[in-house]
């Protein structure tokens, strides 16, 4: 199981130094912890072998005229192993499937594992939108590529309308089936209001882990969630 922390544009040097100190004390058996801070804080994350580092985004080119962007090469230099790509917040700002595919290719070229976010805007829109996002990636990479998808129901974000276990299971199963049809064996995370109290519900949906947001800023609760996942 993955516990992927997306801190978004939160935290500071003092917070991260303190939290990493506590996270390093956790002796996990089966839970893979991946921490994705704002990239400027990566040099301050001195983690043990049970914790991996990641980034929240990557440029869709290796170098050049991309002011303000950070390349896969740069992330790799600071020990990043994973990178979140296509988060709903970036898609809502106009990021396209084409740009996402380019980012995935750059990440894979440098040996980074992409965590590709997919999700539908409307609750009753079916799987077509998700399949379009999944297909765009899988049709443009090698079958041996190590990638992870993260299902985020965009319609649930901030709405208080949390999907049921059955709804999440249906989407995760469909994503995996779609990938299998294209000769890919993938893992799928779930992201959306997961905490230390409800994670068992989503575990039953067949998620291979979670893409976590707000709870990562509350160290004690974040650690409680990780320990709970490890004891599942």
Image: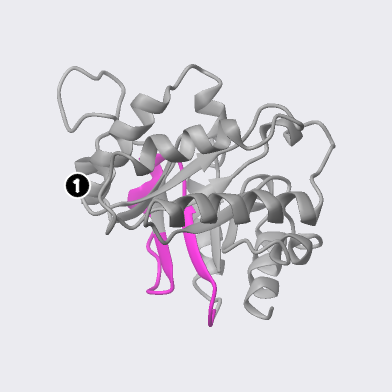
Image side of residue 6 versus residue 52, left or right: right
> Is residue 6 in view from this perspective?
no
Mark 1 element type: helix
Q: Is residue 108 visible?
A: yes
Q: Residue at x 81, y 62 (%)?
A: 197
Instruction: Identify the residue at horizontal 44%, vertical 53% (top origin).
Output: 181
> Pointer 1: what residue?
109
Quick check: is 46 in the magenta stretch?
yes
Q: How is the image coloured?
A: one colour
Q: Quadrant of the N terminus?
A: bottom right
Q: Which residues are magenta?
A: 28-52
Residue 34: within the magenta?
yes
Image position of 71 with respect to 228: above or below = above
Can you give x and y, in whole percent of width and height, for residue 27 in the image? 54, 81
Residue 184 relative to residue 131: left or right: left
The percent position of residue 72, horizontal first and vertical second, equals 25, 41
Residue lying furthest front in this view?
A: 181
Q: Is residue 172 left or right of residue 110?
A: right
Q: Quadrant of the C terminus?
A: bottom right
Which residue, as the protein is rendered here, is positioned at the far left? 64
Image-quadrant location for residue 144: bottom left
Front-most of 96 and 34? 96
Count of numbered badges drawn on the protein: 1
Label 1, residues with CA under 10 Å away: few <14, some 14-19, many ≥20 = some
């Amino acid at each position: 199981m993955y516990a992927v922390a997306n801190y978004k544009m939160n935290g500071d040097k003092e917070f991260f130094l303190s939290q990493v100190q506590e996270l390093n004390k956790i002796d996990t058996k089966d839970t893979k912890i991946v921490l994705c801070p704002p990239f400027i804080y990566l040099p301050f994350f001195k983690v043990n072998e049970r914790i991996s580092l990641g980034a929240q985004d990557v440029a869709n080119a290796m170098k050049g005229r991309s002011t303000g962007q950070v390349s896969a090469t740069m992330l790799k230099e600071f020990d990043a192993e994973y990178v979140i790509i296509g988060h709903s917040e970036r898609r809502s700002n106009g990021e396209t499937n084409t740009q996402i595919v380019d980012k995935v290719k750059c990440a894979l070229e440098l040996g980074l594992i992409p965590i590709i976010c997919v999700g539908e805007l409307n609750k009753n829109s079916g799987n077509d939108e998700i399949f379009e996002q999944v297909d765009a990636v899988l049709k443009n990479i090698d079958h041996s590529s190590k990638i992870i998808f993260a299902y985020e129901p965009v319609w649930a974000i901030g709405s208080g309308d949390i999907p049921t276990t059955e709804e999440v299971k249906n989407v995760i199963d469909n994503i995996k089936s779609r990938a299998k049809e294209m000769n890919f064996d993938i893992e799928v995370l779930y992201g959306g209001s997961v905490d230390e109290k409800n994670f068992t519900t989503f575990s039953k949906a067949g998620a291979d882990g979670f893409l976590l947001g707000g709870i990562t800023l509350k160290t004690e609760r974040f650690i409680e969630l990780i320990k709970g996942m490890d004891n599942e």
